[in-house]
Image: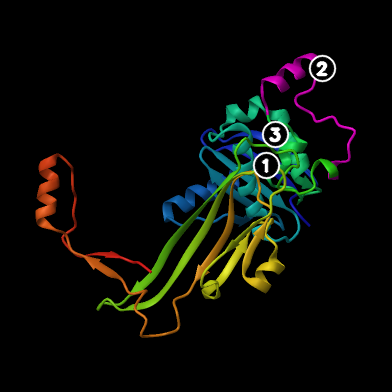
Amino acid sequence: MGIGSLFIVNNKTETLCAVKHWGPAVNPNAVCDKVFAALRASAKENLFADVLTTEGKQYVFHITRGEITYVATAENETEPLMVIEFLTQLHVVLKAYFGDQITETVLQEHHVTLYQLLDEMLDSGIPVNTHPGGLKVLVPPPNMLNRATSMIYGHAGVLVSDQDPSKLLPLPWRSNNIKYASNEIYVDVVEMVDATLDAEGRVLTSAVHGTVECNSRLSGMPDVSLSMSNSHLIEEYSFHPSVRLSRFAADRVVSFVPADGQFSLMHYKVRPPPSKNDNVWQPKYIKPNAWQQSKMQNIGGAINAQQGPLPIYVR
């Protein structure tokens, strides 16, 4: 059970950019009309959803990124998060291949590469390979060399090799021939505090939602280990497929062979410590300084200070 049909649509003109079927052919106009009707109704009510049910037993999943809407259908009951995650990852892959701006013109210009990617990413409607690093080994990104080869030999960047695909791609997210002059990896931790306060300023509920973003520029097949302090406070977490889950469960160490380039290594949720006397999670208030405000305004800076206290949550 997986995706039956996939439609890539320009949501401004409501025209089809690409169509792919893995099951019985579905009328794209009927499906897309219902999707855009649901989007318009949701916009009026300020309520948005990514899944809707059409007549019969057909399920429709859709996400919108810029001017492109990705629509997938399933004839049978399937995991909704799997389909939504695939559509999200499909947009990430297209950005890695064609640039940050994915438009109808870009997709039409590289339609051969687009359909090659869909063939590699899905097998009978089931996602099998959704990592840009690994896909670039199987489907070369469009460049001047590929275009020249296409004009001479009549194909557009098709990978022709007598090697075993498993040797070309030992890991789905990383090829084995990556080389850099200087090896480096950048790790960014982005955290957001979600807290509920009562009228007196006491914290009722609080949690920290964090993301670990990596930018890897390492040669070969590096093995990276990341240790975290107070990792026992992590309640919920999800990892990139490269992370060894057994190692984290045993030693609380994030051990992985990184994907090449930018990727999200980890998403997590942290609850406050159980001790009630620990006020580390209490909000800190900073009142506007009138002297500092007037000083900065005299310099020429535009300051729009609020008249009340500004809550700043720190751990």
Is residue 235 shown left or right of residue 145?
left
**Residue 54 seen anywhere in this rendered image of the structure:** no
In this rendering, the answer to whether 37 lies above or below 249 is: above
**Which residue is at 76% across, 58% downward?**
76
Residue located beneath label 1 in the image: 219
Residue sitting at the far bottom: 276
Is residue 301 shown left or right of residue 129?
left
- Asked which secondary structure carries label 1, the reply is loop
- Asked which secondary structure carries label 3, the reply is helix
Q: Nearer the viewer, mark 2 or mark 1?
A: 1
Q: Nearer the viewer, mark 1 or mark 3?
A: 1
Q: Amino acid at mark 2?
A: Tyr
Residue located beneath label 2 in the image: 153
Find residue 198 and report its horizontal and vertical position in percent: 30, 77
* Quarter holding residue 181: top right
Q: Is residue 148 magenta?
A: yes
Sort mark 1 into few (<14), some (14-19) or many (20+) by Cα contacts within 10 Å: some
- State the extent of the magenta-drawn residues as a range: 142-166
Q: Are marks 1 and 3 in contact (CB under 8 Å)?
A: no
Sort mark 2 into few (<14), some (14-19) or many (20+) by Cα contacts within 10 Å: few
Residue sitting at the far front: 182
Q: Are marks 3 and 2 in contact (CB under 8 Å)?
A: no
Nearer the observer, 27 or 142: 142
In this rendering, the answer to whether 24 lies above or below 180 is: below
Residue located beneath label 3 in the image: 114
